[in-house]
Every structure is written in C-alpha cells, then in structure tokens.
C-alpha cells in the first residue's frame, strides 16, 4: 500500500506516452471540513494529531479508532489521507463539471468507516467522492472489483436508494468477513446493495459471466447519473494476498464494459500487493479509459528491473483450480437478477437547495514549480498541511483529462470522451501493509452521511429520468 506503487504506475503512463494525451492537474488536499462530511470530528482530529512519537500517550484512542496493527501510525499519515481523498473528491468535481472520466489511482480505500480505520484505510475517499457527485446527480452507482468486500462504502449508503453499491469479492473466512449475498440494504435502501460472493481461483470467463449480465441489468434498472468503479488490483492472478486468477485484460474488461455506457465514470485504485502487477494493471486500464490498446512490450523506464524477466505489460494467469462451479455461478447470477427485478423505478429526489461545492482549486502541473510550497500568506486555504518526510518530498495526486483527438483519429477511438485522471507520483511513507481484522455488519450511525441529501436541489437529467417518474423516493 506504499505510494511507491503509484509512482511506478505514473512512470509507465509517462513512458507509454499516455500522459502526452492527458492534461495533468494537481488537486487541493482535502481539508478538515471536507473529511468531516462523512467522518466524525473527533476521529479526524485524532488522525491529524497522532504521530509515531505520541501514539503511546493515546492508547485508548488508538483502540477506539482501530489504529495500530492493520492501520499503523506513520510519519505523514494525515497528509497522506488529505492527498488521496483530495484526489477523489477533485475527480468528482471534474465529473460534475462535464468531464466524462476521472482517475485517481491513489484512491479507492474502501474499508474506512465513519469513526474508525480498517484494512490500511483511514479516510474513505470513495464515500466523500460519492457525496460530492450526489450534489449534481440523482443516483450514483458504486462498483467494487477489489478482492475484498467494499464494506465501508456499503455501510455508509446501506439505507438510501440514491446510491447503489455492487461488490464482487472473495467471501468466506476472508477479510473483512462481510458481503454475504443476503446483505441487500435496509429501509429505503433495500435491494440497493448487491453482493457477489466468489471463491478461490475465479478466471476471466467465469468473472465476466457474472459481471456483464449483472452490471448490464443494474445500468438498465438503476440508471445512475454517475458511476464510481473501484479497481483494486489484488483480484489479479499472483497477488500476494489475493486468491483470484484474473488476467490484466480480464480485470480491465470491467473498466471497458462500464465505460461503454457513456455515463460519467470515476476510476479509483484500491488494494494490490504484487506491485509490479498493480502498476501494469492500472497503466493498461488508463489506456482502456483513453480508448487505446497498449503494446505488450514494455518501454524502458526507471523501474524497468521490476518487470523482468519478460518486461511485458501482460502476465499469464496461473493454472490454479477454479473453485467456482458453473452451478454456483448460475445460482448467484439468478438470485441477484431476481433482486434487481424488484426495483420497479429508478428513484428520484425532491428539488431543494443544493449544498455548496467542495472548494478544491487546481493548477496545471506544467505551470507550477514542483519545489514550491504553499506559503502561510497564500490565498489557498489549507488545514495543517505538513511536509511528508525530512527530505521535503511530497505526494501529489494529479487530475488527468483526455485532450481532444485530431480529425484523423481512428473511428474506434472516437467515443467523445474527455478523460480526467488523478493519480499520485507518490512519496514513500513509513507504513506497513494491510492486515486483517474482522468487521461488524453495517450500523445506522455510519449511514448518517447521506441524511443531508434528503433536501437537495438536483438538476433533472432527462437522459436518466424514466417516463412518469415520481418526484419522491419510491420504496422497492
């Protein structure tokens, strides 16, 4: 989980020439009040204040907020959280202003809860980004292809029909222990949580036999105004913690499929612990977002030795056993499609006042001195942003947007997509990897994040609105 893997991804993007086709922007780090739109004030204050030197004086708080083992305290912790969260919220702001695709490979930390850290996730950037999208879109879809269940995001939106969460994950004696197919949401959110429990060794064909029909039906029934896709790479074959057998092409097929609906799309990172394959995967998926097929032969780059001995972009899946039988897959697909059939209408929302947008001023990276720091007298507001380490290096999340292609661009590539991508070049932090501590089922407290959206003014989107659609929430 160290940002080194983001730096490797960025290097591949540069040497494949993808950055030349994108505008790179650097979002503002998320401030205290941005994080507190979902997280508890005292939890955010704790993350801001705790350091490796002072943690022994805060034993009770460490236990209360689940910080310590799976989620260690390290130098630059709060700045790390501000950076990756600011990238995801900044990407959502871009989508709200007309961009088609935004990417933040440093985001996707889906386990964090309202009042506690989990699985090396301290701040839930995904929930914050979805809350931002809800200011403009009546309905937002969240899709998670990390091998671990997206429990923090599901829990946050478990009782609302404005956000549908769909998670494809390993289930059964596996972190975080949640994500049963029977967990379908509660109250107005009933049937708006979908869980796809999978077993070891699932391959591309089996995975897509579930993903495409389920997500196709979700898009038909729910009709989201925006989609957030968490692309955790620990579901790839050969991951150090994972046990799936997906190829990079199979993993990226999920990105390609969701892109095909031409709905504003936010792509986020997530898990991934064989870092050479993480960089390969997210580089290839950036190419998919741009509509370009990348050559398998890897160009020389500063991390070239990581990708030996073949020095190729793709790696072959293993011959491990696929424990997901055809009957099991058919049963899962049938059951979830049946749940979706119970959603008669895409829900709407009353027209009220819209909350102000997140203030995340951005500058073009090419016009900014990389060594310049924000001065105390600057008109750009920051909350206790500190250097990340003694050498003065800092992690930067960038926002990327596809430039308009020339008239001679291939018709296959002319999808009309402008892509904004945010990712971190990454400063290496003193942090250990993710572990496992079992989480409890969703509770009402963390679902409070969406309460304010019961009184939003949402611009109507005729492309997403059903005929004779009611103006209030419909119970399934």
Image: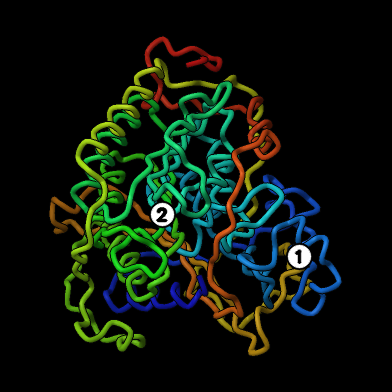
Residue 410 visible? The answer is yes
In the displayed image of the protein, which residue is found farthest to the right?
A: 57
x, y (%) of residue 93?
53, 49
Q: Is residue 139 above or below residue 106?
A: above
Q: Quadrant of residue 454?
A: top right
Label 2 Cα crowd, 10 Å radius (few <14 / some 14-19 / many 20+): many
x, y (%) of residue 242?
38, 62
Instruction: Report helix, strand or loop for mark 1.
Output: helix
x, y (%) of residue 277?
32, 71
Compute the Cα span from label 1 to label 2. Answer: 28 Å
Does the CB distance between marks 1 and 2 fall below 8 Å? no
x, y (%) of residue 110?
53, 52
Residue appearing at x 63%, y 44% in the figure: 357
Of residues 346 and 115, the one drawn nearer to the viewer in this rendering: 115
Residue appearing at x 36%, y 55% in the figure: 419
Of residues 193 and 179, the one drawn nearer to the viewer in this rendering: 179
Query: Mark 1 = which residue?
Result: 48
Judge left or right: residue 362 versus residue 181: right
Q: Quadrant of residue 167?
A: top left
Specify the label residue 325 is tagged with: none
Label 1 Cα crowd, 10 Å radius (few <14 / some 14-19 / many 20+): some
Q: Is residue 3 above or below residue 454?
A: below
Query: Mark 2 = which residue?
Result: 146
Residue appearing at x 44%, y 56% in the figure: 268
Q: Which is in the foreground here, disc 1 or disc 2?
A: 2
Residue 86 visible? The answer is no
Q: Of label 1 and label 2, which has the lower sequence position?
A: 1
Of residues 65 and 304, the one drawn nearer to the viewer in this rendering: 65
Judge left or right: residue 296 versus residue 119: left
């Amino acid at each position: 989980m160290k940002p080194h893997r983001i730096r490797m991804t960025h290097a591949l993007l540069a040497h494949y020439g993808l950055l030349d086709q994108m505008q790179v922007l650097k979002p503002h780090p998320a401030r205290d009040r941005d994080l507190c739109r979902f997280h508890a004030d005292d939890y955010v204050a704790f993350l801001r204040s705790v350091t490796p030197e002072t943690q022994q004086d805060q034993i009770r708080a460490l236990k209360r907020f689940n910080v310590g083992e799976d989620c260690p305290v390290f130098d630059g912790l709060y700045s790390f959280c501000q950076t990756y969260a600011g990238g995801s919220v900044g990407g959502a702001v871009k989508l709200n202003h007309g961009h088609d695709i935004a990417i933040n490979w440093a985001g996707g930390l889906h386990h964090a809860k309202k009042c506690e850290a989990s699985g090396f996730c301290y701040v839930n950037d995904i929930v914050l980004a979805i809350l931002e999208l809800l200011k403009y879109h009546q309905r937002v879809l969240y899709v998670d292809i990390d091998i671990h269940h997206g429990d923090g995001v599901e829990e946050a939106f478990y009782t609302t029909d404005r956000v549908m969460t769909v998670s494809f994950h390993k289930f059964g004696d596996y972190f975080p222990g949640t994500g049963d197919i029977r967990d379908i949401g509660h109250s107005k959110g009933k049937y708006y949580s979908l869980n796809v429990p999978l077993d070891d060794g699932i391959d591309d064909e089996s995975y897509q036999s579930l993903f495409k029909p389920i997500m196709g039906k979700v898009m038909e029934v729910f009709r989201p105004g925006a989609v957030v896709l968490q692309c955790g790479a620990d579901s790839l074959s050969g991951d150090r913690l994972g046990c799936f057998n997906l190829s990079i092409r199979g993993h990226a097929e999920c990105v390609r499929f969701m892109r095909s609906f031409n709905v504003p799309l936010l792509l986020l990172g997530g898990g991934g612990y064989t870092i050479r394959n993480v960089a390969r995967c997210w580089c290839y998926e950036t190419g998919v977002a741009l509509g370009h097929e990348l050559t398998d032969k890897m160009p020389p780059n500063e991390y070239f030795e990581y990708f030996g001995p073949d020095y190729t972009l793709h790696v072959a899946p293993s011959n491990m056993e696929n424990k997901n039988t055809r009957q099991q897959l058919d049963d899962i697909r049938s059951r979830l499609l049946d749940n979706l059939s119970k959603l008669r209408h895409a829900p709407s929302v009353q027209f009220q006042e819209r909350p102000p947008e997140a203030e995340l001023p951005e500058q073009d990276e090419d016009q900014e001195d990389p060594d310049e720091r924000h001065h105390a007298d600057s008109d750009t507001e920051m909350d206790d942003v500190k250097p990340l380490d003694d050498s003065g290096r800092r992690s930067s999340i960038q926002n990327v947007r596809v430039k308009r292609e020339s008239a001679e661009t291939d018709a296959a590539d002319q999808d009309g997509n402008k892509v904004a991508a945010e990712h971190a070049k990454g400063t290496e932090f003193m942090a250990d990897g993710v572990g496992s501590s079992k989480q409890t089922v969703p509770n009402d407290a963390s679902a409070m994040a969406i309460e304010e959206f019961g009184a939003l003014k949402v611009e109507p989107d005729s492309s997403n609105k059903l005929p004779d659609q009611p103006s209030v929430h419909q119970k399934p």
